[in-house]
């Protein structure tokens, strides 16, 4: 049997333990999932916004690269047309000069001309 002078403190301790268990149950089962849902929604919104911005930046970079490539191709085509339309030189038409140019030994890169 519990002495009467301990019943009050035991009841108080039991009440505090019950209140603590209820608080931690609420914290673990109700509050934490709600906070996590809010954080996940906020992160998803930020990630979605960043993906849209990244896609726009990548698209702009690809368009700029395409414009640069088109300009380079146009310049290359002008150069190719001017080379193709140029009149052949007399030294290249002569078979001896052509044979000498074809049979010449290639020099390694960086070597000085004799």
Image (cartoon, rainbow, N blue to C red):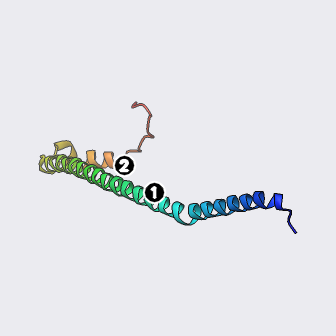
Task: State yes or no: discs 2 and 1 in contact (Cβ < 8 Å).
Answer: no
**Residue 95 place in picture, x, y as percent:** 24, 50
**Viewer-nearest residue: 83 or 66:** 66
How many numbered circles are shown?
2
**Residue 3 place in picture, x, y as percent:** 86, 62
**Residue 102 place in picture, x, y as percent:** 33, 49
**Residue 87 place in picture, x, y as percent:** 12, 46
Residue named by callout 1: 39
Residue at image position (72%, 58%) is 12
Q: Is 37 left, or right, of 26 in this rendering?
A: left
Residue at image position (33%, 52%) is 54
Q: Is 7 left, or right, of 57 in this rendering?
A: right
Residue at image position (23%, 48%) is 64
Is disc 1 surrounded by few (<14), some (14 to 19) or many (20+) residues within 10 Å? few
N-term-proximal mark, 2 vs 1: 1
Quarter of the image that includes the N terminus: bottom right
Is disc 2 surrounded by few (<14), some (14 to 19) or many (20+) residues within 10 Å? few
> Residue 95 bears which disc, if any?
none
**Viewer-nearest residue: 13 or 68:** 13
Quadrant in which residue 5 is drawn: bottom right
Residue at image position (33%, 54%) is 49
The local secondary structure at tag 1 comes to helix
The local secondary structure at tag 2 comes to helix
- Is residue 16 something one can see in this rendering? yes
- Is residue 94 something one can see in this rendering? no
Residue named by callout 2: 103
**Viewer-nearest residue: 64 or 52:** 52
In the image, residue 37 sits, relative to residue 99, either above or below, namely below
**Viewer-nearest residue: 79 or 9:** 9
Most distant residue in the bottom direction:
1
């Amino acid at each position: 049997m519990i002495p009467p002078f301990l019943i009050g403190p035991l009841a108080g301790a039991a009440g505090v333990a019950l209140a603590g268990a209820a608080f931690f149950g609420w914290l673990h089962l109700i509050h934490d999932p709600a906070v996590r849902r809010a954080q996940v929604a906020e992160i998803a919104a930020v990630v979605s916004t960043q993906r849209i911005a990244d896609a726009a930046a990548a698209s702009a970079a690809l368009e700029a690269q395409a414009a640069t490539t088109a300009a380079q191709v146009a310049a290359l085509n002008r150069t190719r047309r001017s080379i193709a339309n140029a009149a052949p030189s007399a030294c290249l038409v002569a078979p001896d000069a052509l044979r000498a140019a074809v049979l010449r030994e290639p020099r390694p890169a960086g070597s000085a001309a004799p």
